[in-house]
Image (tube, grey):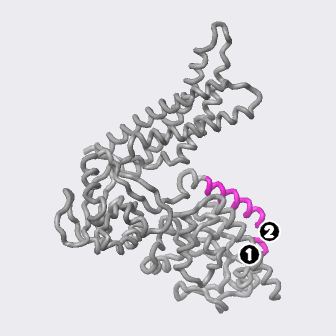
């Protein structure tokens, strides 16, 4: 039997395919407009050099691919109509060409024909629209053939449940294999897909069937189960989509979506993904590399003080849980007596007798955390993000605190939104999670810079407090 592509492999393949197609077609939009302009020249007139317009074409290709990404047209297209695809490329092309036109006014070394850019509008709409429709058609044929199909489970029998089941079964090009549904009460078979069990026991069924996506269509009498469903999906990395009548029960950003015209709301759209993840990583590399170089003399001084103050190593390696639940060794300057946790991990507390004299100074000024710059440089952490926790405590919090595991969908940070708002040390975990989720759902590079500045000010205040106490 021929092996079929997994949903993840299929998505990567088509992202690359779409990216290359968009870039190539965008380049030929300008070149086609150039050829059209040459055809309208009077006899004997010298045509402008092709290489100058080739440069303009490359610039448009880069701009258009960027705006196509920024407008969300590279997200999963299954269930999206050709009209939506056309409007997506039309919006991107319009913005890209306007930016291109504006840039030519400031470039004085060569006078580009404004007609070439005017022609490019119509050509872009046509060529990119046709290209997207062809790529989408190929994608749907491959989905219908079984490649990249997602395992889908319905939870609840209210809202658009029966309509959605019918649409998915009628249109294999949406790329779903329906595992079945969970019912709120014993109402019997309601759809042409298997009845798996009770919605009240959804965690057991989700664990057993391992769906790629869950669509929540609970009846109004069972809306109280929504938060639990979303939390289970969060902990297991499963896409969760809500029927529109349920969206008011959930906080955070929402992505309005559809399956064959049926409106849905996809929850938990992470902003630090794709190009944004590249920007965040570049920021992390630049800041961590610069700070390591600048702080090298300080590291030497701190290391000497630690060795003079107590026996043991300079650095302390502690296992923490990072992005996607992956464990790693986090670096810190040792601030406790050697063997302080021989009886197992425990929370640090105020006036902890295990902390050394130099350790108290390091903790008061947050200098004990600075070796984590090496974790950032190695890609295990970020400058800004939710603070990481040890596996022992993660297992404990996962069971008792809603949405806790969603913190692990991004890299852990040296500092975070919770920390600059005073939630450091022995403070409420529930409150920290709320601040962490706000950061994850509202990430931007400007937000990271703001948190870094607030962190520097907070550390400065801590240092001042230490000096005044002395």
- The reply to whether the magenta stretch includes residue 283 is yes
Which SS does the magenta portion mostly show? helix
- The reply to whether the magenta stretch includes residue 229 is no
Lower position in the chain sequence, tag 1 or tag 2: 2
Query: SS at mark 2?
Result: helix
Residue found at the far top of this picture? 44
- The image position of residue 160, as x and y in percent, is 30, 59
**Quadrant of the snapshot with the N terminus:** top left
Residue pointed to by mark 1: 459
Residues under labels 1 and 2: Cα distance?
A: 19 Å
Image point (69%, 76%), residue name: 368
- The image position of residue 313, as x and y in percent, is 67, 78
Residue pointed to by mark 2: 297
In screen coordinates, is 321 left or right of 334?
Answer: left
Above or below — where is 333 with respect to 259? Answer: below
Image point (51%, 31%), residue name: 25
The magenta region covers: 279-303
Mark 2 crowdedness (10 Å alpha carbons): few <14, some 14-19, many ≥20 = few
Quarter holding residue 453: bottom right
Image point (82%, 85%), residue name: 468
- The image position of residue 88, as x and y in percent, is 49, 42
């Amino acid at each position: 039997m021929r092996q079929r592509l997994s949903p993840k492999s299929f998505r990567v393949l088509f992202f690359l395919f779409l990216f290359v197609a968009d870039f190539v077609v965008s380049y030929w939009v300008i070149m086609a407009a150039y050829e059209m302009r040459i055809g309208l020249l009077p006899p004997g007139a010298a045509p402008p050099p092709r290489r100058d317009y080739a440069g303009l074409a490359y610039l448009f290709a880069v701009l258009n691919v960027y705006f196509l990404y920024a407008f969300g047209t590279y997200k999963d297209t299954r269930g999206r109509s050709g009209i939506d695809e056309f409007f997506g490329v039309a919006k991107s092309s319009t913005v890209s060409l306007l930016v291109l036109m504006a840039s030519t006014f400031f470039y004085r070394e060569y006078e580009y024909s404004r007609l070439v850019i005017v022609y490019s509008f119509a050509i872009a709409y046509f060529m990119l629209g046709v290209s997207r429709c062809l790529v989408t058609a190929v994608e749907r044929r491959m989905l219908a053939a079984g490649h990249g199909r997602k395992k889908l489970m319905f939870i609840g029998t209210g809202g658009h449940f029966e309509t959605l089941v019918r649409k998915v079964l009628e249109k294999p090009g949406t790329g779903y294999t329906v595992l079945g549904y969970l019912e709120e009460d014993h109402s019997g078979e309601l759809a042409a897909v298997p009845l798996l069990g009770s919605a009240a026991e959804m965690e057991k069924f989700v664990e057993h069937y391992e769906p790629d996506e869950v669509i929540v269509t609970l009846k109004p009498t069972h809306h109280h189960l929504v938060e639990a469903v979303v939390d289970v999906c969060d902990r297991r990395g499963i896409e969760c989509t809500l029927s529109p009548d349920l969206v008011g029960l959930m906080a955070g950003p929402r992505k309005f979506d559809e399956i064959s015209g049926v409106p849905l709301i996809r929850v938990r759209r992470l902003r630090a993904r794709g190009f944004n993840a590249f920007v965040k990583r570049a920021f992390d590399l630049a800041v961590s590399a610069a700070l390591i170089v600048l702080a090298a003399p300080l590291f030497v001084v701190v290391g000497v003080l630690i060795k003079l103050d107590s026996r043991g190593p300079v650095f302390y390696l502690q296992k923490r849980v990072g992005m996607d639940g992956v464990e790693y060794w986090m670096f810190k300057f040792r601030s406790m007596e050697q063997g302080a946790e021989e009886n197992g991990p425990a929370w640090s507390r105020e006036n902890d007798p295990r902390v050394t004299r130099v350790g108290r100074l390091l903790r008061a000024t947050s200098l004990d955390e600075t070796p984590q710059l090496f974790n950032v440089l190695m890609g295990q952490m970020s400058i800004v993000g939710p603070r990481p926790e040890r596996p022992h405590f993660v297992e404990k919090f996962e069971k008792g605190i809603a949405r806790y595991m969603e913190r692990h969908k991004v890299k852990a940070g040296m500092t975070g939104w919770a920390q600059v708002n005073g939630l450091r040390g022995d403070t409420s975990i529930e409150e920290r999670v709320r601040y962490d989720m706000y950061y994850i759902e509202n990430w931007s590079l400007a937000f990271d810079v703001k948190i870094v500045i607030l962190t520097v000010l907070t550390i400065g205040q801590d240092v001042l407090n230490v000096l005044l106490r002395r």
